[in-house]
Amino acid sequence: MPANASDPQTQMENKAFKEAVRAVKDKNYAHAITLFEAQAKMPRHDAQHNLAVLLNAGKGRPRNYVEALFWSWQAQLGGIEDAEDLANDIVDLLPPKVADEVRSRVGEALQARIDANDLNAIPQFANYHLTILAEPDYANAYIWYSIAAAINLPETSDARDDAESQIDSKDLVDLQMKTQTLFDKYKFKPLPAIGKGGKNAS
């Protein structure tokens, strides 16, 4: 979950991010790209977007559409709206086979985060199946949104229900069984419910 702003690790990340932004303003793009890349791998989504912008522009490193797309899609899934426009521009420049390879890499990166118990990756993985794949995969989106909703991740119940509305009723029981198998495999535990005002409900 997002770290508290007073957490020393978060303060250090924010300092590095500000240093990277300053490096861009100073046109020290090589330094900026190194700092953004380290944070992009954490993953910090605004850093992923900034890294994608620099790679797309060829500043600090030679232009690289494949890597720019890889990071812009992850930033998009992390809620950075501008990343979607950037990704759409880049994907049109790549052969479909290459774009599909990048899609697979994004999926593997999200799967690795889930394996490392990064709960924020769960709804992002669900959304990946709807927005990043060439054709929406409502079944897998339903599975991962169902898990996200079960552990009280915010704003995922409606997304689960929307995905369910796209699935043939005869397939639902099988998908729910697959969901339960994954839920048990990862030993997911519900988070404390968040009440109004952002406080944990008692």
Image (tube, helix red, strand yellow):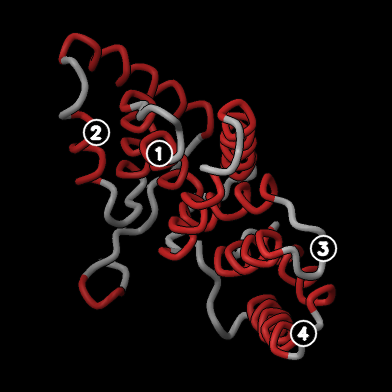
70 relative to 38 in the view: left or right: left
**Between discs 2 and 3, the one toward the N terminus:** 3
| 146, 36: nearer the viewer | 36
Q: Amino acid at mark 1?
A: Ala
Among the two numbered marks 4 and 2 on one chain, the one whose residue lies closer to the N terminus: 4
Looking at the image, is mark 4 or mark 2 nearer the viewer?
A: 4
Mark 1 vs 4, N-terminal side: 4
The Cα atoms of the two marked residues, 2 and 3, are separated by 40 Å
Helix, strand or loop at mark 2: helix
Q: Are marks 1 and 2 in contact (CB under 8 Å)?
A: yes
User: Is 199 positioned to the left or the right of 55 in the image?
Assistant: left
Single out the mark in the foreground, 1 or 4.
Answer: 4
Horizontal side of 53 relative to 156 (left or right) equals right
Question: How far apart are labels 4 and 2 at the CA level?
Answer: 45 Å
Q: Give the mark nearer the N terminus: 3 vs 1.
A: 3
Packing grade of label 3 (10 A; few <14, some 14-19, many >=20) is some
| Residue located beneath label 3 in the image | 61
- Give the camera-side residue of 41 and 182: 41
Q: What residue is rendered at 31% in x and 27% in y?
A: 138
Position of the C terminus, as image quadrant, is: bottom left
Residue found at the far front of this picture: 93
What residue is pinned by disc 2?
163
Q: Is residue 131 above or below residue 170?
A: below
Mark 4: secondary structure: loop
Q: Give the crowd class for mark 4: few <14, some 14-19, many >=20 residues within 10 Å.
A: few
Residue 113 location (% of width, % of height): 61, 45
Question: Closer to the camera, 87 or 70?
Answer: 87
Q: Nearer the viewer, mark 2 or mark 3?
A: 3
Q: Amino acid at mark 2?
A: Ala
Q: Which residue is mark 4?
A: 27
